[in-house]
């Protein structure tokens, strides 16, 4: 079972998500929260696999709660999917910087939401190449000055090359085709890069790729 926590200030929204997730045999809602403080508490109590986190909540918002959750060693295995009605690139970037593994708007198709929970639980990032390209083009330059060489000396030349391709939004299959290697080999390079750089998932590799200066907006 994939254990899920719901964080949203609207009880009706939580009820809808609970009913949807409860219809899936492999998903279980283990807790709910109406604000960011409660979300952090519930996660520490239940140790969920995935959190569906609203951004705009009273008091501590979803981005602040996401930072607390991803920084807590006890919740190292917990993945956060940010849900919002605000489909703006700024929120996507802030969510990734906070440690989120994915981003969805609330009007996402129900089947897509269920798939998203499973994808993130499986260790993948919930970011389409189109979203990634738009995101970095608009906001990567504004994040903070790049720090060239930021831990990149830990990577082999091939791993740097793969990281750059991840940061431009390519999937493992697309990376494999570009480098003329198998998808399994591409996935291995991505996984090793994550371990060496201390990235929780592929989404954080995207952020690291740009903040390190390895890739710059416009190289798409």
Image (cartoon, grey):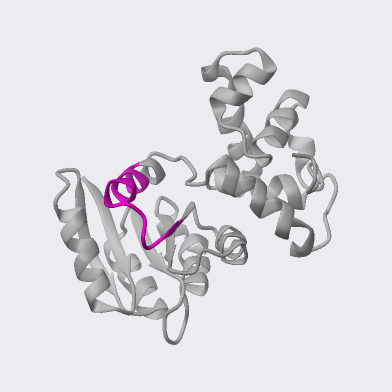
Tell me where residue 185 sits by quadrant: top right
Above or below, comparing residue 127 to residue 195 in the picture = below
Q: Nearer the viewer, residue 3 or 8?
A: 8
Quadrant assignment for the C terminus: top right
Give the residue at x 69% y 35%.
163
Taken as a whole, is the magenta stretch helix, strand or loop?
Answer: helix
Describe residue 159's horizontal placement relative to residue 215 as left or right.
Answer: left
Describe residue 196's horizontal placement relative to residue 158 as left or right.
Answer: left
Tell me where residue 14 sits by quadrant: bottom left
Give the residue at x 64% y 36%.
166
* Numbered-mark total: 0
Question: Does 186 appear in magenta?
Answer: no
Quadrant assignment for the N terminus: top left
- Residue 198 % position (x, y): 61, 46
Q: Nearer the viewer, residue 193 or 82?
A: 82
Give the residue at x 59% y 31%.
190
- Residue 43 % position (x, y): 34, 66
Give the residue at x 80% y 45%.
218
Above or below, comparing residue 138 to residue 125 in the picture = below
- Residue 194 % position (x, y): 59, 39
Q: Which residues are magenta?
A: 104-118
Residue 199 appears in the figure: no
Question: Does 105 appear in magenta?
Answer: yes
Residue 123 appears in the figure: yes
* Residue lying furthest bottom: 59
Above or below, comparing residue 78 to residue 187 in the picture = below
- Residue 181 % position (x, y): 62, 13
């Amino acid at each position: 079972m994939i254990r899920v926590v719901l964080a949203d200030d609207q009880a009706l929204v939580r009820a809808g998500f609970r009913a949807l997730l409860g219809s899936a045999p492999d998903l279980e809602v283990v807790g709910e929260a109406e604000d960011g403080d409660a979300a952090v508490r519930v996660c520490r109590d239940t140790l969920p696999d995935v959190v569906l986190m609203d951004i705009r909540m009273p008091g501590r918002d979803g981005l602040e709660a996401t930072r607390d959750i991803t920084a807590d060693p006890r919740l190292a295995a917990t993945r956060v999917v940010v849900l919002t009605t605000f489909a703006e690139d700024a929120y996507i970037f802030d969510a990734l910087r906070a440690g989120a593994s994915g981003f969805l708007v609330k009007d996402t198709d129900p089947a897509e939401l269920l798939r998203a929970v499973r994808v993130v639980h499986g260790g993948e990032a919930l970011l389409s190449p189109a979203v990634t390209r738009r995101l970095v083009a608009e906001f990567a330059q504004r994040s903070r000055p790049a720090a060239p060489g930021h831990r990149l000396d830990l990577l082999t030349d091939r791993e740097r090359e793969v990281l750059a391709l991840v940061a431009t939004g390519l999937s493992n299959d697309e990376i494999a085709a570009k480098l003329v290697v198998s998808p399994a080999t591409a996935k291995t390079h991505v996984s090793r890069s994550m371990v060496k750089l201390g990235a929780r998932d592929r989404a954080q590799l995207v952020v690291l790729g740009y903040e390190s200066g390895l890739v710059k907006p416009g190289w798409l």
